[in-house]
Amino acid sequence: MSVLVIEDDPGIATQLVRGLERAGYAADSVVTGAEALRRVPPDVVLLDLGLPDIDGIDVCRQLRRASNAAIIVVTARGEEPDRVLALDEGADDYLVKPFGLAELLARIRAVLRRGHRVGCEVLRHGPLMIDLRTRKVTVNDTDVALTPKEFAILECLASDPGRLVSRQEIVERAWDEHWYGPTKVLDVHMAALRKKLGVPTLIETIYGHGFRLADA
Ligand code: CA
């Protein structure tokens, strides 16, 4: 998981990058909004709203348009309107300075857990298109009607195509966060989902482990 810190205070930036690296993230920092927008979008962006070049809100808006990165904005105390504006412009969460590393890491885990981002409404993978807002699914531009469970399973796989998702994780995400029962229940829904999608190779089974959305 990669995190890009956009922060013009070198002391804060260095500290954050070190802390994130210690926590296992691939972290990097840039000083300006322009630099941030030139980067390959990371998984998570930590965006200081007070930047020397471009207004932080504009950076947020442009990042959201261009990428699926989770955006956590950082503001100084008392900048309430900016924070609200940032959330309206597609930020996923915000932190108020000063904040501790533990809190930052918790926020990052939370936005990543939420899976799909507020601004990321359409997932595409090969012939598959999933509109998260309208919950519409098409395969090769043909509508596919899914049950809520089937949709949840597909969303879970499509939120990170290519990643092997364990049976347990799918069940936890598609059924209930605290499901401790057998995962056999998944097979019935998975079979129905595959049949409806009509492309047998789209969902790959890794026996004994889980499933993944196959490379298109
Ligand atoms: Ca600043």
Image (tube, grey):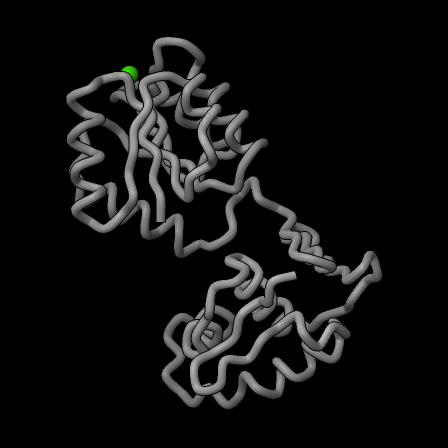
- In percent of the image, x 47 and y 24: which residue is there? 37
Q: Which residue is the extreme one toward the front?
A: 215
As drawn, 157 above or below 38 = below
Residue 85 visible in the picture: no
Residue 168 lies, in percent from the top left, at 41, 78
Camera-nearest residue between 216 and 181: 216
Residue 179 lies, in percent from the top left, at 40, 79
As drawn, 38 above or below 204 = above
Q: Quadrant of residue 34?
A: top left
Is residue 47 rendered to the left or right of residue 207?
left
Is residue 167 rendered to the left or right of residue 194?
left
User: Could you tell me how many numbered marks the image carries?
Assistant: 0
Residue 138 lies, in percent from the top left, at 77, 60
Image quarter (top left, top right, bottom left or bottom right) of the C terminus:
bottom right
- In percent of the image, x 77 and y 74: which residue is there? 198
- In percent of the image, x 48 and y 24: which residue is there? 38
As drawn, 67 above or below 97 = below
Residue 42 visible in the picture: yes
Camera-nearest residue between 182 and 129: 129
Q: Quadrant of residue 86?
A: top left
Residue 12 lies, in percent from the top left, at 18, 25
Q: Which residue is the extreme one toward the right?
A: 142
- In percent of the image, x 82 and y 56: which residue is there? 141
Q: Quadrant of residue 45?
A: top left
Give the image quadrant in which the ligand numbered 1 is located: top left
Is residue 213 rendered to the left or right of residue 137?
left
Q: Which residue is the extreme one toward the top?
A: 53
Is residue 192 rendered to the left or right of residue 164?
right
